[in-house]
Amino acid sequence: MEQHRIRTGKVRVEKVSRRDRSTHRKCSTSLTRITSVKHISIRSANSVRSSSPNRKIIKDHHYQNNSSDHIFDKSEQSSVGSTNTVNSVRVTKVQRVPSVFRPNPVSSTNSSFEILAKSEINLSQNEISGEPTKSIKKRSLGTIENLMTSLHQYRHPSKQKSLKTFMKLCCRCTRKRALLFLICAILFGVLLSILLIILLRKSKSTSNQTYREVYLRWNTTGITIYGTTGLRGNTSTQLSSSFGLVFDSDDNLYIGDRYNHRVQKCSIRNTSCITIAGQANAVSGTNMSDLNGPTYLFMDANNNLYIADSGNQRIQFWTYGANYGKTIAGVTGSAGSGLNYFNIPYDVALDSRSNAVYVSDHNNHRVMKYVFGNLTGSIVAGGNGFGTNNTQLYRPAGLVFDSSTNALIVVNFGATNIVQWKLGDSKWTIVAGDSNGLNGNTSTLLDHPTGVTYDPIGNMYVADMFNHRIQMYSIDQSNATTIVGVSGQLGTNSAMLNYPVSVAFDHQLNLYVADSLNHRIQKFLRY
């Protein structure tokens, strides 16, 4: 086929001759989307061989196949005699031919080349007449840049294949990888937990040390908040031999008013009191609404009250807000040594995990255990007669159940010491005081202690009754510090005590002491 070349600054598209197809069959067969090929050339005016300005662009019919794929024909020429360069576009008929880029021919009506050929090319008359050339208006899909981008994508299939393979490998989640990820996550969690535990222990140790040294200090002079010093009375704010002390969750103080045969509930905010168990007029009795000489108290998490009703030889359970109690251990008004009897029950403790009730049976020299609802108990400590041997108890008084060691802390009143008796063991170990029952007023000795309590940190506080003082034992220490009272001296002033029997703390860790024979409650402010 004769090929004509003209001066042009535009796009030249020509049909490929059949004899040239073999040249392209050697190209890569992986380019599968091209169905017809055209040569595209852009030449400047300087490279045009033929300078004839009047050569006419004609429609080519020299094809063997009478396909209907005629695209368009445009021909423009310059004016006769014009010396200006002719800008023209030659677009020939395109025959749908087999792809020269693959062995199997596939026809396509959406070829990028056909889109290029079908693009609108508007040449103004001014361009033909030699006036300054304006830009050609084309569709975005038919631009040379888009065409070159399409060819570039088709000529790099290996890169796309590598990318797909890489993505498959990254996204593939095999069992081994999942197991490895799980193991790594567990190891990371364990290491993080160990680190946090170490940091928390270090912080707790530091804070506890600071708390003990800086914050656990109290004024040595007390404030009388209930009772009248040295004077018995039965008004709402007077006491007669104050005994057990306990706080509820709202910081209300409950007082065992022993010889007024009642329990008083007192607000520490306005120092007012009401009777919540027993008779307000200080009359004793044996009914479910009466008490007789109550000593120590215990309150559970629901503000239910357990009362050692010593004169009635029983333990009374008072539901919060109730007007009468229920006997859960002992026989009302009868003393004895049987498993369902007491001889002066002094204190009561509760194991909240099992609801087991423990009672110090003072004159029977033992500690009893009762399952709630069963009036027959069992001996868990002592019961071998009174004495100072480590298998015996001697008039036990105050009692605390320590859930962390599953043991009872017993104030061994007659042996003047504090002992620990683990449940299931047959003997005790010494906690404070002399193991042989020696009494004294030094930092390591006691003289007939009665009550014991702990602060939130774990320091122990003992009402050293006959020494008229309150002793503080730091954690795991056998030497005590006197924080209230004067060792071995009783008195009625604000810095002295007269047979103290119990200790309690409010939420601010202010210290409260039942100053028994001064018939008052003393408050010692923490600072």
Image: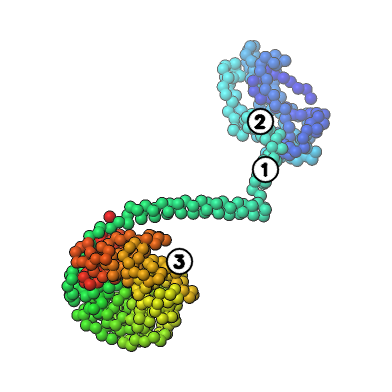
Badge 1 element: helix
Which one is closest to the eye, mark 1 or mark 3? 3
Q: Give percent across and percent down for residue 352.
A: 42, 72
- Which residue occupies the foreground of this view, 171 or 361? 361
Disc 2 marks a residue whose amino acid type is: Met
Q: Quadrant of residue 120?
A: top right
Per the image, the residue denoted by label 2 is 148
Q: Which residue is mark 3?
A: 404
The residue that mark 1 highlights is 166
In terms of sequence position, does the residue under pointer 1 or pointer 3 come before the other?
Answer: 1
Neighbours of disc 1 within 10 Å: few (<14), some (14-19), many (20+): few
The residue lying at 19 percent from left, 80 percent from top is: 281
- Mark 2 to mark 1: distance in Å? 27 Å
Residue 52 appears left or right of 25: left
Mark 2 or 1, nearer chain start? 2
Q: Say what amino acid the circle numbered 1 marks.
A: Phe
Image spot of residue 205 (x, y percent): 42, 54
Q: Disc 3 marks which amino acid? A: Ser
Q: Nearer the viewer, residue 397 or 235?
A: 397
Q: In front of the other: label 3 or label 2?
A: 3
Label 2 or label 1, whichever lies nearer to me, is 1
